[in-house]
Image: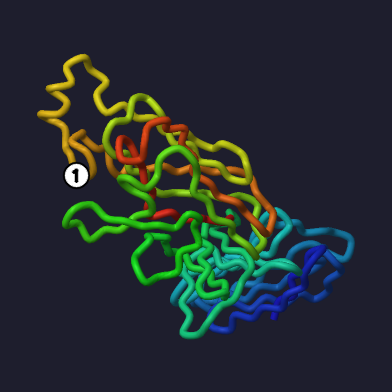
């Protein structure tokens, strides 16, 4: 039996197959006498450290067991147990698994970390109940909840992929949604794609979060002088007889800690919606 005590946590450990640690006297951080019996050797060896007046300070303890190695150490004030398969880090408030974690049941947590670094997860709202998933997406499929305003969706030609907006739908103006009841977090990340349809002439679409512009994407249907070449070699999916620019990916981040978030896409198009238009798809909100 070994008693390991730091300022935050006291833990008792026992490893019976190969090593036995016997502290004769312990006082807070000080080990005045330690006797270690190594049973894996042919002849048992005894190590004695110090006396009643001395102090032994170690960074870590290594146990060479029959099947694996075990290390006990201090990491920035936290107690850490390391084996070949798993690393456990703990203090009086947090218990972190820094390696693999297998569970046949359910695990509930307000934060998700890896190696003490907060990880992203997504916020998805379904029928007034809030669920948190590591992978979820707002893909604007028909017959599914749509939290965007305006919320008209469409598709191009014979394609079965739906998106928000589209030809003759979105022009100058905005689409937006509000996320409510967000769990504890310190940063957000927003990903998705933007579609540009028909005759864009340098205008753009801006992405705003709580009124802050995070990104603007601009498009010109034919940046060269030869418009006939653009029409000949460009790809026209739907709408007017102009090449389209589809699936422009974006990923933006910002510091954020509030329980509510307003997300907005805005365009300054001055032409009609049937001359130039846009749409969005696969919008995901990550929290960390």
Mark 1: secondary structure = loop
Q: Is residue 66 above or below residue 56?
A: below
Residue 275: image x %, image y %? 30, 35
- Front residue of 13 and 167: 167
Query: Which residue is situated farthest in the top direction here?
Result: 225
- Front residue of 207 and 156: 156
- Front residue of 57 and 240: 240
Q: Residue at x 13, y 22 (%)?
A: 228
Give the position of the C terminus as an image quadrant. Answer: bottom right
Which residue is tagged 1? 237
Q: Residue at x 45, y 43 (%)?
A: 251
Q: How is the image coloured?
A: rainbow
Among the 4 quarters of the image, the one containing residue 248: top left
Residue 64: image x %, image y %? 51, 69
Q: Residue at x 65, y 49 (%)?
A: 256
Residue 3: image x %, image y %? 75, 75
Q: Residue at x 59, y 76 (%)?
A: 108
Residue 40 in sight? yes
Left/right placement of residue 130 relative to residue 241 reads right
- Front residue of 112 and 6: 112
């Amino acid at each position: 039996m070994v008693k390991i005590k730091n300022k935050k946590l006291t833990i008792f450990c026992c490893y019976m197959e190969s090593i036995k640690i016997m502290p004769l006297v312990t006082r807070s951080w000080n080990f005045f006498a330690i006797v270690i019996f190594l049973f894996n050797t042919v002849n048992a060896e005894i190590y004695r450290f110090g006396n009643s007046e001395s102090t032994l300070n170690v960074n870590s303890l290594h146990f060479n067991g029959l099947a694996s190695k075990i290390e006990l150490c201090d990491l920035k004030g936290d107690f850490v147990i390391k084996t070949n398969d798993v690393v456990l880090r703990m203090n009086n408030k947090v218990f972190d698994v820094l390696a693999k974690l297998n569970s046949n049941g359910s695990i509930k947590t307000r934060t998700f970390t890896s190696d003490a670094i907060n990880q992203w997860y997504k916020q998805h709202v379904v029928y007034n109940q809030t669920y948190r998933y590591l992978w979820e997406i707002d893909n604007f499929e028909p017959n599914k909840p749509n939290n965007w305003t305006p919320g008209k969706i469409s598709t191009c030609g014979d394609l079965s992929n739906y998106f928000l907006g589209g030809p003759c739908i979105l022009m100058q103006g905005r689409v937006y949604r509000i996320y409510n009841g967000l769990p504890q977090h310190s940063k957000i990340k927003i990903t998705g794609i933007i579609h540009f349809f028909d005759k864009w002439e340098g205008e753009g679409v801006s992405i705003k979060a709580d009124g802050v512009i995070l990104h603007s994407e601009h498009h010109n249907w034919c940046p060269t002088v030869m418009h006939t070449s653009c029409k000949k070699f460009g790809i026209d999916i739907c709408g007017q007889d102009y090449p389209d620019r589809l699936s422009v990916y974006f990923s933006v981040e910002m510091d954020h800690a509030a329980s509510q978030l307003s997300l907005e896409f805005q365009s300054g198009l001055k032409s009609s919606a049937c001359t130039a238009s846009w749409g969005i798809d696969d919008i995901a909100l990550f929290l960390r």
